[in-house]
Image (cartoon, rainbow, N blue to C red):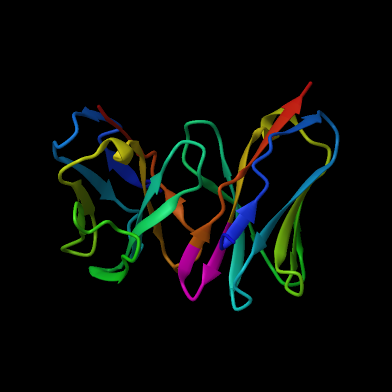
Amino acid sequence: EAGVAQSPRYKIIEKRQSVAFWCNPISGHATLYWYQQILGQGPKLLIQFQNNGVVDDSQLPKDRFSAERLKGVDSTLKIQPAKLEDSAVYLCASSFNADTQYFGPGTRLTVL
Amino acid sequence: RKEVEQDPGPFNVPEGATVAFNCTYSNSASQSFFWYRQDCRKEPKLLMSVYSSGNEDGRFTAQLNRASQYISLLIRDSKLSDSATYLCVVNNNYQLIWGAGTKLIIKP
């Protein structure tokens, strides 16, 4: 079974630039999550989708972050404009039953 | 007080020893609990769910204490390959709250 795919794996940008990340969940998984993990901390949930609807985006900085999952399958997360403090690993996860989550390899973002 | 708290460690433990660490949570209505393992520069992977009656998977035992609002993870006969960060996750009405993790280092 194919796992959660994410791209790119690494991205380096300058502050105030824009960046987008892509995630393709495991086939059949209705729930998709985007997390931000800063070095030395646990993952912080940014947004949770159930199919193409948003379940929880309470911790998403909506002035600069946006996410969509238009067809209920793959998803994109965008940051515009990026700040230095956005440097982190962005993890995408999916689950079938909203409990056990399977993570992709993550995108390591460095903002200079 | 944080919603989910863990001792960051690191716990330095000799190979073959038993090690245990806890995770406390603040919401008494939390419904389900999990332990994830994260290797350095890798994504988290589910280690085990934590059931009310406690559960065991090989060398790993997870316990839930609702009265004191903590979950625990016990690792027996620790191996070098157990070195990782162990993250606890608490499900509050389908909102998943993650601890910051406990770093475990197993030494030969």
Magenta stretch contains residue B2: no
Q: Is residue A51 above or below residue A81?
A: below
Which quarter of the figure has residue B70? bottom right
Residue A96: give x, y in percent of width and height: 42, 65
Q: Is residue A19 above or below residue B87?
A: above
Which quarter of the figure has residue A48? bottom left
Point 59% across, 70% down: residue: B32
User: Magenta stretch: dominant SS?
Assistant: strand
Q: Is residue B57 visible?
A: no
Q: Is residue A13 visible?
A: yes
Q: Give the magenta part as a residue range.
A: B89-96
Q: Of A98 and A80, which appears nearest the observer? A: A80
Quarter that holds the C terminus of chain A? top left
Residue B2: give x, y in percent of width and height: 57, 59
Direction from residue B56 to residue A65 in the image, left or right: left
Residue A10: give x, y in percent of width and height: 29, 30
